Image: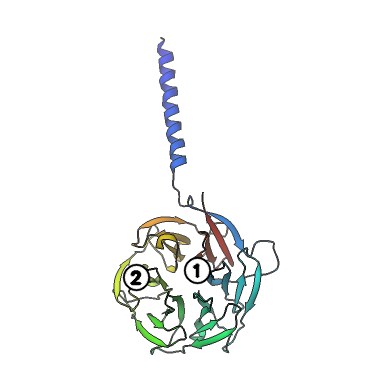
Amino acid sequence: MSKSFVFYFILSLGLLLALSGNIFKILSSSSPLSNYIFDRNIPQDGIGDIKIHQPEGIELDSQGNLYVNDIEPNSIKKFSKNGSYLLSWGSTGSGNGQFNHPHGNEIDIDGNVYITDQNNARVQKFNSDGKFITKWGTHGTGDGEFLHPHGIAVDSKGYVFVSDRDGANIQKFTSNGTFITKWGSEGRGNGQFIQPWDVAVDSNALVYVPDNGNNRIQIFTNNGTFVRTWGTLGTEDGRLNKPAVIAFGPNDFLYLTDSGNHRVQVFDKNGTFITKWGSEGDGKGQFSAPESIDIDSAGQVYVADTTNNNIQVFVPRN
């Protein structure tokens, strides 16, 4: 056997092993986008003349209908499960059914829609067709008063939780607005907040708060007892930059809009990083300060890409 044959055989074998190693890495790689892929926009491009402008709050009902807080016209838009426009309600003002920057929204088990009417310092409650039911709140720092009501959640028993962004507290109410309790103050300690952006309740009735200015998530019992916190400022996996809105998916996995990092991150209930996707931009799968988020029964993830004026929908990769 010639030396040249041996040399080329070894060289070819080395190249084959290197190539196979690269193929293995490609096939086995779990990139940030490997778990979810872009599927569509709502409203879908080129279909109809319905536009949305700076969508902030989004929420899905039990039928898969999507409710969108449309900031520029101060209205709520409702879309069907397939993305068709159904109806809208609201206009600029302070009367019943009017809004001045509707930010957060939530839907209870009966299909009622709760909206944090931020600059009117109140919460409004509607039925699923937009008929006004009740309201509560006024500007102030007392019990049941708000400076800027921001996030909102309803637990399985119908209790309503509201994050007062500039009041640096969480308030708890009955479903008709009777004040129960509140907790929090401005600061960086446990149970303190700098702009609590949202509030969400998991299946164990624990209350999660994205503490936006402190770049962390705080967890409480449903009466405000501090449980734990996690998160720190950064761009690495699991680190946060202006965490905005939380939605819970299967297994109580926590889906979070990491707004300052222009991405979505997913964690388990203990705060362990699972996956992420998104980067800054205006293309498909890119975001500009994403705000709200929700997950439907099929595992599709809806993200309010606020500054880009659309809703992006992502589906699990098979």
> Which residue has dot 1 on it?
292
Residue 285 sits above or below residue 7 on the image? below
At horizontal 45% and vertical 75% (from top left) the residue drawn is 153
Q: Position of residue 194 (x, y in %)?
A: 37, 75
How far apart are the alpha carbons under marks 2 and 1? 18 Å
Q: Nearer the viewer, residue 36 or 13?
A: 36
Task: Name the kind of residue labelled 2 in the image.
Answer: Gln
In the rendered image, is residue 236 in sight? no
Estimate the x, y position of residue 176 in percent, counting from the top left: 47, 86
Q: Amino acid at mark 1?
A: Ser
98, 220: nearer the viewer: 220
Q: Would you place residue 15 above or below residue 315 in this image?
A: above
Residue lying farthest to the top in this orientation: 1
* Left or right relative to 252: residue 105: right
Residue 259 position, x and y percent, is 46, 65
Residue under label 2, please give it. 218
Question: Could you say where residue 278 lies in the image, as x and y percent from the top left?
Answer: 49, 57
Badge 1, how many Cα within 10 Å: few under 14, some, many 20+? many
